[in-house]
Image: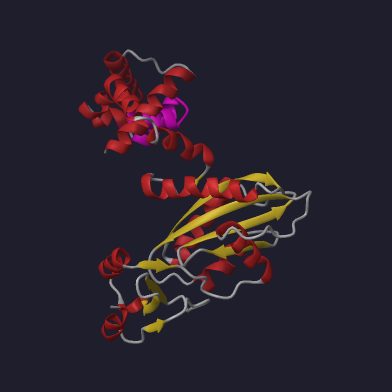
Amino acid sequence: MLKNLMSLYANSILYTEQPQHTSDQFYIFFDVSQKQWLAIPKSSLTEKEVTLLQTLYEQVKIPAKPLTTLSKKWHDFLLLNGSMPSLNEDSNFRFIQFHIQGRGVDPTEMEPAIKGFFSDEVQIIWEDDHNGIVIEETKHMSLTESELTSIADTLESDFYVKISFYFGKVYLSSSYLRSHFQQEKEYFEFAKEKLEGTNILTFEKVFPAFVAFNLPEYMKEKIKMELSSVFSEDPELYTTIKIFLENNLNASLTAKKLYIHRNTLQYRIDKFIDKTGVQLKDFYGAFTVFLACLLYEQRK
């Protein structure tokens, strides 16, 4: 079947062994039954054709260029269950994952731009043209979350792509680094699929939604019965309460973001309290209602 596809797409390449490296201008698809790989130029495929081929074959993601010795060790350690690189025991490590949306992304151009924002040397490994990991090894982490937001904005304006980051925790050098990374990767994959509205993600931002999504169905139904049904009846009330909670119950800031008067905001909050009987004056009420907001988002 892959041989037939070759005749449809000019400049395609058929492999009987998995290629170790290939140009970043190709998609590679693997036929499990025939043990063959086909590289098709990205410029020859529409998005619908890519989606169709992904359902018929396994898409193979190969580093677009040869890795340095250290970056290859990190790549194999984190992604292929390889042996751990030689690390300084007194160093801290942080993994900053990123995802780039848009076609025609060139890692060879993007990588130097990303590295340029770090004061210390970092390793960048690519899972494919759209996903990669920045590995920081330093005693003093060089970038804050707000600085990473500025980086995302700069890259988007320079390269005309949308980019999102998962800002990992700081870990000591240990044999647990891979498991820490794999857990953060799970959170980032969840966020890319389920969450919208932010391009800078952290454990604190993702985990509540992760918990809400993985609650047993009977728990979700209880929360829906107690709280979420109010949002279904009045979606505007949901938006108001969610933004109010995200802004730490700050009425002035919430009213400003919603472009409404504070009296209007207070009216909506009182309306929610009257309908649910749940107060929003302390942590317990805020946490419970925020969980209901997350579940309502999932149902939407």
**242 in magenta:** yes
Determine the residue positioned at 27% across, 21% down. 225
Front residue of 274/195: it is: 195
Give the number of marks: 0
Residues drawn in magenta? 239-258
Determine the residue positioned at 56% across, 48% down. 167
Above or below — where is 94 with respect to 8?
A: above
Front residue of 183/99: it is: 183
Residue 124 in the image: x percent, y percent?
60, 63
Above or below — where is 68 with respect to 165?
A: below
Left or right of 219, for residue 83: right
Determine the residue positioned at 39% across, 28% down. 291
Residue 176 in the image: x percent, y percent?
65, 46
Front residue of 230/145: it is: 230
Determine the residue positioned at 30% across, 19% down. 226
Colouring scheme, one of rainbow, by chain, secondary structure, one colour: secondary structure
What is the quadrant of residue 48 in the picture?
bottom left
